[in-house]
Amino acid sequence: MLLKRTHPQALFEQLGNTLFQQLLTSSGAGEEGFRKNYLPPIEKLALTIQSLPLERGLFDHPGGALKFGLTAGLTTLRLSAGVIFVPSATAVQRMLLEPQYRWAAFVASLASVPLIVAHNVHVKIGDKSWTMASKQSTLWDATEATGEYEVSWAQPRPTKPSNSLGVVLLQGFFRRGMFANIDPAVLLAMCEGINASGHQSPSESALAKIVRTGQEKVKEIEAQRRELFFEPPSLIPTNATSTEDATTPATESPVDDGTPTALNTLTGRLGAGQSPPPNNAGTSSRGDTESGAEVPIQISQWARAIVANLPDEISFVDEGVRISKKALTFGISSQRMYALIYEAGLVVSKQADGFIGNVTLADVFRSEQRAKL
């Protein structure tokens, strides 16, 4: 199948704004932290794999690998919400390290995707095979001249995707300075968490388990969906004679100022013109309501997502605002979201179909409604 070189913005628009709103909410990093720490690996994944499928039978359509990657990344963030990665650390240490572990789990989930694709898909640009080990490690860069690439299923192999091969293939996936402010223990856990084979290692860490479980859940849900709805056979042909050029020396391409970036293409939906974010990935901050009361930024982002996507799930009452159970499940688990709101002192009462938030929380929703106009 012949596929076209596609700008990341178009790839993201095909996935829909809801997915990015959920990623933003689940990250707990706020808009600035999300833009600085989460969007770059998302962008690099889109530049690297473009519209490639993932594997035979699951996410095997054009664009399937990117959809799987971001959905698995979202699931990983949700699973990370209630995990204490460093139980022996002090409270101060956990405040610094836990956001880094969440971010690292997300990056490990995304970094696993190109390795899965490399095992299952053969790519040709013109008359030459392409892999991430080629001189140009992203499909976006490699197809600058041709504007297109040919995709076929690689010859079936008896082995699983190799994490060891990732040492070579992922050199161009990670940009320079990306881990400058990350604790070495977190970086080690991230490297061990990159899992292209789906195997559980005997010494599996909490981060690695979350990444593996997130991928499993997404694949299980997709398999169940395909059982319920008729899906035509994949149009990706099988290449029985393909040979992949995996021995080409890998090089790390410098960032080109002209390269389309998610920072530019998504600022319209996430908000532009913000001040520089803090260095630590996922660092949380707080937002102010018009009444001057402070609320956690994750709650503000959740409220914005509800106003944009589920406006009918809230209603204003004398005590403040009524929130449905459906609204609570947007972004992260309902239990975790309710706990955040309750701990912030924004709950008036809990009900069978949701809860009543106080006036401060109502102000947050009213502000977001006015901002949407």
Image (cartoon, rainbow, N blue to C red):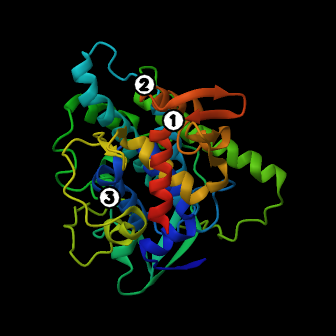
Using the rendered image of the protein, determine whether residue 116 is visible from the camera's viewpoint. no
The residue identified by callout 1 is 358
Q: Nearer the viewer, mark 1 or mark 2?
A: 1
For the residue marked with disc 1, what is the amino acid?
Asn
Q: Position of residue 241 (x, y in %)?
A: 57, 67
Cβ atoms at labels 1 and 3 below 8 Å apart: no
Q: Position of residue 344 (x, y in %)?
A: 41, 30
Judge whether 43 appears above or below 98 on screen: below
- Residue displayed at 22% across by 61% down: 252
Q: Nearer the viewer, mark 3 or mark 2?
A: 3
Q: Is residue 63 left or right of residue 225?
A: left
Q: Residues within 10 Å of mark 3 (few under 14, many from 20)?
A: some
Q: Position of residue 132 (x, y in %)?
A: 36, 62
Query: What number of labels is visible?
Result: 3
Q: Position of residue 70 (x, y in %)?
A: 50, 53
Judge whether 115 appears above or below 231 on screen: above
The residue identified by callout 3 is 40
- Residue displayed at 62% across by 33% down: 355
Judge whether 199 appears above or below 286 on screen: above
Q: Which label's residue is closer to the chain start, 1 or 3?
A: 3
Q: Which label's residue is closer to the chain start, 3 or 2?
A: 3
* Secondary structure at numbered mark 3: helix
Q: Which label's residue is closer to the chain start, 1 or 2?
A: 2
Distance between mark 1 and mark 2 Cα atoms: 36 Å
The residue identified by callout 2 is 206
Nearest to the observer: residue 116 or residue 355: 355
